[in-house]
Structure formats: C-alpha cells, structure tokens
Image (cartoon, coloured by chain):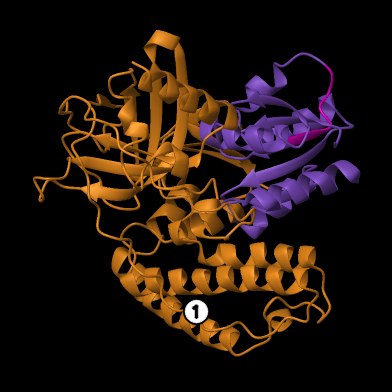
Chain colours: A orange, B purple
Amino acid sequence: MAEYWIGDAEGRVLGPVSLDVVQDLVNTGRLTQITRASRDGQSWGPPNVFPEVMTLLLNAPAPEALLQSERQEAARVREQLRTMQGRPPHEIFRLERNASVDAYRNAFFKLVKRFYPDRVRAQAHPDLRKAYADAFQFLSRLMVHIERELDAGGPIRPLPTIRAVPPPPPLEDEPLTPTTLTPLMKTRPIAVVPRSPTPPSRPLPAAPPHQGRYSYQPHEFIGFERRDDRVEVTVRVTARNSGMFTEHPLANLKQGGVFLACGKSLPLGTLVDVVFRFDAERREVRSRGRVIVEHTGGDPTKPHGFGVRFITLVEQDRSFMQQFVERAAQF
Amino acid sequence: MPEGSILIVDDDAFVRTLLRDMLSSQGYALVEAENGRAALALVGPPPNLVLLDLLMPQMSGMEALGQIRDRWPSARVLVITSMDSERLLEEAMEAGAAGYITKPFHPMEIASAVEKALAA
C-alpha cells in the first residue's frame, strides 16, 4: 500500500499513512491545511507535486456544500437526541441493564465526543453548533445522573427534567490592578493598556463547595482546541498587580481563575494560553483557560479586560501562586 | 499507589502538563518529549507505557511508533490523537499500538486507559 507523509502549516507531520487515511481526514475536515507532502518522509514538496494528494484537496467539499451538509447533519443529530431522550440509559449506551459505572463511563466517552463543540469548524452552520451543544449537554447530565443513581445503589431512574441554569449575577467590580499583556500570537493580538494602581482589597466570596465529581462539561475535555482560535498572553506578575488573582468575584484564584485588566476584552469562551512571569521569583507558570467574563468598556465603573477560568493548572503552580498572593497582601 | 513509568510524547505543552499533573498525582513516574525524535533521544530505562500523539513536528507519531516498538519492545503504546479517522487508528494498531484514545480526552478516561494498559 502506498505510503504518504503530510505536513501542516504549523510544521507538524503525519505519516506514514495510506492515501485512504489522507482522504478520510480531508473529507471529514480533520485536515484542512496540508502545506507539504512526501512519499518517503525525507524529501518533501508542495501538495501539487503529488497529483493524487492534490486531487483529494481539490475534491474537498466546497464551503456551500459543507454548509448544506452541516444542516443535514444538524437535523440528524437533533433526531438522534430526540431518540436518546426517550430511551433508558443502558439502551442509549448499548449496555446491559446492570452494567457497571465504568462500563457506562467508557460508553459515554465514546458517544459524547462525537458532539464535542470544538469539532464544529469555526464557520459551521449555527444549526449544527446548537445541535452538538444540546446533545453534549444531554449526555453530560445523563452521565452525572447515572453516577448518582449507581452510587445510591441503583436502579437508574429516568433523568429528571433540569431547569435552565440561571445566568450569573451582575458583576460589581472595582478598578483592578495593572497588568501587562504581551501578545504572542499574530492571529489574535491584544493591545495593552496598563490599569490604575491596586485598590484596597475586599473580602472574597466563598468558593463553591467541591463536589469531588466531574460534571463532564466540555471544558473538562482536553486536547482538541482549534489552534487558530487560541490567544496567547504573557502576564508579568508583581506584588503590585497580584490583585488580578483575588479581586474579581468570579475570576479569581480560589475559583480557579484570574482577571486580566487590559486595553481589550476577549469574547466569552475564547481559549487563552496564559504565561505568568514572576520575575522576582524567577518562575514562570503556564495555564490554559477560557474567557468566562468580558468587560468591553461599555460600563465606565468596570475595568476593561477579561476573566479567565483555568482548564489546566498544575497543583504545584496553583499553590505557588496562592503563596505569592498571600505574601503580596502583606506589603 | 500504582507503579509504572510513562513517557508522554505530545507537541502541545499544555496537554503534556495536564497529563503530567494528572498521572503523577496517581503515583506514576513521568517523562515527557515534544515529538518522536526527542522521545527516541531519551536515555534511561524503558518506559512501561508511552502516550503518543500522532501529529507532531520533526517526527510524526506513526514514525516514532515503529521505532519505539523496536527500541523498547516491552513498552505498551497508547496513541492519543485528534485525527479520529477509523482508518488511521486501524493503521496505528497494525503498526503496534496497544490502543488509542481520541482527543478531546477526559481525565477519567486517561486514568482508566492507563491503568488497563499497564495491567495488561
């Protein structure tokens, strides 16, 4: 079987794989930016040097055809969701009625990933985005319900109707701390505007109780972020601006986040890679998170910037940051 | 505490960080590499398990997979990839992978897969 290596715009390589695999990945939109190809992994050329690869790229679905196919896919997913909602959990996951929680989890992971929100391309038809989100939410809630029921000794009763989650309370912010952000990605630059000096601290709201369980929401799933939709920022942390970790009622370290006051905000849900530079401590902490609060400057009483909730933060780093904040508060 | 050494090979530093944090807290010994070439340049005892991304700079996971199997025959390899083509995963299994996990992955999924792979 003929073997191919292919490379993308970020210098990553996949191969050796058969042309069937390349075709599969191109047709499903998994590979969209093939910049080079090879037959031996050593000598590379642009895709047009390889007519068989070029044919695959040229035959990739056109944008209009993709949108049409996404509408059809959305209808299929909605129908699938309706079917799932009317079935007992063990049938949804194709398990025996008395299956173990591990069996349910394994089956859940296989099924739910089909509807992971980031699988939908950025320009996808909104119907598809909504259908995926609804299916994902249903399965996540169902998995949490199954765990509770089996923990309680079973059997698994029907999933109760869940009321919509109420929106978060309005924010009452004070001006926050100076933060220096340096854009690293050319695709999504962030302008930097230093903020006013640190205001007096105020009591933090109590952190929500830790349930010791997963919610199986999309943010708990890692490794499939669209790289073209990610913002990288570098933050120089000093004792003077350490309030970024404490002063926002939602985006603070105790709740697993930070508020970055700067000249621009970012849309809710944006994926952000943050590098915190603690120059005095000669330490660098990296974390990935999502924007959960955006202040675009419309309200002059609120600081311009955005709040991030961390997705990845090593416990040692969290501990170090907490100690840093406590030391800074003594100054 | 579980025993076992795990080599994480992924070009995404945040994925490596997350896996390291998660698995080290369960008692595993972790080593990291950012691509296949860096993984094969490592010295030291063979890992019990390799978590291997497929799409990486310099040396792809598929290329590394064969060489890892040659160099450390006792090591089991779990492919971790966002390229969830059935054909690709079949080819990875034919090339010697013991199993695969598709991205995005959940912490509980990784913990379970690692435990099973090391127990096999």
Residue B22 on image: x %, y %: 66, 38
Q: Secondary structure at mark 1?
A: loop
Q: Position of residue A60 (x, y in %)?
A: 41, 60
Indicate left or right for A318 with A171 as reference: right
| Location of residue A247 by image quarter | top left
Q: With respect to residue A110, does B2 lie above or below?
A: above
* Nearer the observer, B16 or A34: B16
Q: Amino acid at mark 1?
A: Ile
Instruction: Please report the residue visible at 21 percent of the width from the left and 30 percent of the height from the top.
Output: A199
Q: Is residue B65 above or below residue A238?
A: below
Q: Residue at x 66, y 67 (%)?
A: A108
Q: Nearer the viewer, residue A166 or A80?
A: A166
Q: Is residue A266 left or right of residue A270?
A: left
Count of residue discs: 1
Can residue A39 be seen by looking at this rendering? no
Residue found at the far bottom of this picture: A86
In the image, A325 versus A159, the foreground residue is A325
Image point (26%, 32%), residue name: A186
Question: Which residue carries the number 1 mark?
Answer: A162
User: Secondary structure of the magenta portion, mostly?
Assistant: loop
Q: Is residue B41 magenta?
A: no
The magenta segment is: B45-50
- Say which quadrant the C terminus of chain A sits in: top left
In the rendered view, does A153 fall on the left or right side of A19? right
Q: Residues within 10 Å of mark 1 (few under 14, many from 20)?
A: few
Residue A8 appears anywhere in the view? yes
User: Horizontal and vertical percent for residue B19?
Assistant: 64, 37
A12, B11: nearer the viewer = B11
